[in-house]
Image (spheres, rainbow, N blue to C red):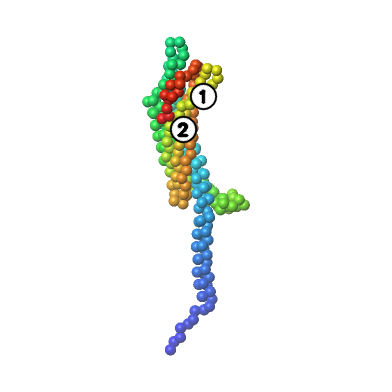
């Protein structure tokens, strides 16, 4: 009768050690993911804000330089027979046109926006002592954003019997993560001056109230 050979004790030790190492690696991986993911999300959000800021500024700057917007494109100031300001009337059609074109330019650029950034592993741990240290991980920044644009009108005193009228574009961008691991959602706003003029003479109250944000 044949007897089965017992497996050597070394084999059992190696097996147990191997199982222990696998479990240890899984525990470390889970812990690292929980520790790193929030910081990685903050880094991705920060980099997405920077990328969105750059994209919006480039889009608006290009539009302003190309279209050469002037004060008369948005407003018509009417005077009475004695030369006093009778009314300040908004050119609604032009305002809506500019607002739509700026929004279209921004959103078109945001759809194509994509950049990469290298972040040291130490910076992802959230530790002050490890910040900026270690090998670098390449993050793909592709913010899924949508921007809304509205034109604002503001009257301010510019001295004795003078009023400064500013027309600006306020851009609000909603930014969301485009990758599951970078879980964030935030909003950022910008304001760009489109045109301004000094109106000499008292501006009728009804003219100021007649202007509304589009």
The image position of residue 191, as x and y in percent, is 49, 32
Q: Nearer the viewer, residue 3 or 177?
A: 177
Residue at figure coordinates x 45%, y 29% from the top left: 152
Q: Is residue 206 left or right of residue 160?
A: left
**Sequence order check, earlier mark of 1 and 2:** 1
- The reply to whether dot 1 and dot 2 touch (C-beta < 8 Å) is no
Badge 2: residue crowd in 10 Å (few <14, some 14–19, many ≥20): some
Camera sees residue 190: yes
Q: Position of residue 13 (x, y in %)?
A: 53, 74
The location of residue 36, given as percent across then percent down, is: 52, 54
Task: Please determine whether, in this image, residue 182 is positioned above or below residue 17.
Answer: above
Can residue 115 be seen in the rendering of this structure?
no
Q: Which residue was labeled with disc 1?
A: 156
Residue at (46%, 86%) from the top-left corner? Answer: 3
Q: Dot 2 corresponds to which residue?
A: 170
Q: Dividing the picture into quarters, in which one does residue 214 lie?
A: top left
Residue drawn at the location 53% of the way across and 61% of the way down: 28
Up the image or down, 194 lies above or below 56; here it is above
- Residue found at the far right of this picture: 129
Q: Residue at x 57, y 51 (%)?
A: 126
Query: Is label 1 in a helix, a strand or a loop?
Result: strand
Residue 92: numbered disc: none
């Amino acid at each position: 009768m044949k007897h089965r050979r017992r497996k050597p004790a070394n084999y059992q030790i190696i097996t147990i050690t191997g199982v222990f190492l696998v479990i240890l690696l899984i525990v470390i991986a889970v812990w690292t993911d929980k520790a790193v993911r929030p910081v990685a999300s903050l880094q991705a959000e920060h980099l997405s804000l920077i990328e969105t800021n750059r994209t919006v500024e480039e889009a608006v700057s290009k539009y302003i330089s190309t279209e050469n917007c002037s004060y008369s494109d948005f407003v018509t100031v009417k005077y009475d027979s004695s030369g006093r300001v009778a009314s300040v009337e908004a050119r609604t059609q032009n305002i809506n046109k500019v607002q739509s074109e700026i929004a279209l330019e921004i959103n078109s650029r945001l759809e194509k926006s994509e950049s990469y950034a290298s972040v040291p592993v130490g910076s992802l741990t959230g530790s002050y002592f490890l910040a900026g240290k270690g090998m670098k991980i390449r993050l793909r920044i592709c913010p899924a954003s949508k921007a809304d644009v509205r034109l604002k009108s503001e009257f301010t005193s510019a001295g004795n019997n003078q009023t400064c009228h500013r027309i600006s574009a306020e851009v609000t961008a909603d930014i969301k993560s485009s990758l599951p691991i970078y879980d964030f959602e935030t909003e950022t706003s910008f304001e760009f001056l489109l045109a301004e003029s000094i109106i000499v003479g008292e501006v009728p109250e009804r003219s100021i109230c007649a202007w509304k944000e589009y």
